[in-house]
Image: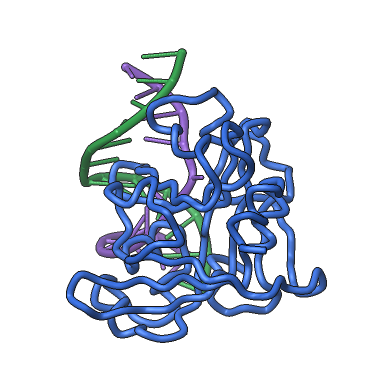
Chain colours: A blue, B green, C purple
Amino acid sequence: MKLIDELEEMSAVDAARRLLGCELIREFEDGTAARVRIVETEAYDQTDAASHSYNGRTQRTDVMFGPAGRLYVYFTYGMHYCMNVVVGPEGYGAAALIRAVEPINGEDFLARRRPKPGIELTNGPAKLCQALEVDKSMNGHDLTDRPLVLEPKPPLDDAAIVATPRVGISKAIDMPWRFCEAGNSYLSRP
DNA sequence: TGCCTGATGTTCT
DNA sequence: GAACATCAGGCAC
């Protein structure tokens, strides 16, 4: 079964866990490319007060209610973008926020877009968007298509996944809906 | 090393 | 008009 079909049938929480370890391939306009591995996600769905979709479908959140496997990009704090993978059935507002990725190759190309090299490259939701050149023009992008492709990988073992409360939100703060790969050094925080 | 704050646009009330 | 799923630089310790 295709990953997109799996994601469509999953809850946001299951999908966020499923996406750990999967890879993203980004082709840049200048012909270069980079491959990264997802190591940290957060789950959001419409029953969740911290989610953009909680207050219903609006112009901004429309993509979240669309088909699974699309990219939901939003702008926040006046200067930053964050990217989510839309999950769940069409009409249900759910997504998994990608908080951190680990560069596999093309690290040099990512570093060109970031002020600091190394770990600082992609260990935060706004940082990885900058490194991957994801902005509002990518909102609604289909992740089976270039120039940004989501590549399925086998699910991680439950033992390799750490669940913690989410970061940087003010509502529903005790739900352990942040998932990261245990021991990975590219996480946004330990 | 670690806390504090400024920058800054979009969305919703 | 306020809130916001943030980051990076500056300054104090």
Q: Is residue A33 above or below residue A152?
A: below
Viewer-proximal residue among A171 and A44: A44
Question: Would you say A114 lies left or right of C13 here?
Answer: left
Q: Is residue A46 above or below residue A133?
A: above
Question: Would you say A6 lies left or right of A187 here?
Answer: right
Q: Residue A54: x and y, percent?
A: 58, 28
Indicate the quadrant containing the C terminus of chain A: top left, top right, bottom left or bottom right: bottom right
Question: Would you say A108 lies left or right of A54 here?
Answer: left
Viewer-proximal residue among A38 and A123: A38
Residue that protrudes farthest toward the left in the picture: A30
Q: Residue C13: x and y, percent?
A: 47, 65
Viewer-proximal residue among A150 and A17: A150
Q: What residue appears at the point 51 percent right and 34 percent down from the top-left corner?
A: A52
Q: Residue A97: x and y, percent?
A: 53, 52
Q: What residue appears at the point 36 percent right and 47 percent down from the top-left corner?
A: A139
Question: Would you say A21 lies left or right of A175 here?
Answer: left
Q: What residue appears at the point 47 percent right and 50 percent down from the top-left corner?
A: A70
Res A108 → quadrant = bottom left
Indicate the quadrant containing the N terminus of chain A: top left, top right, bottom left or bottom right: bottom right
Q: What residue appears at the point 57 percent right and 66 percent down from the top-left corner?
A: A189
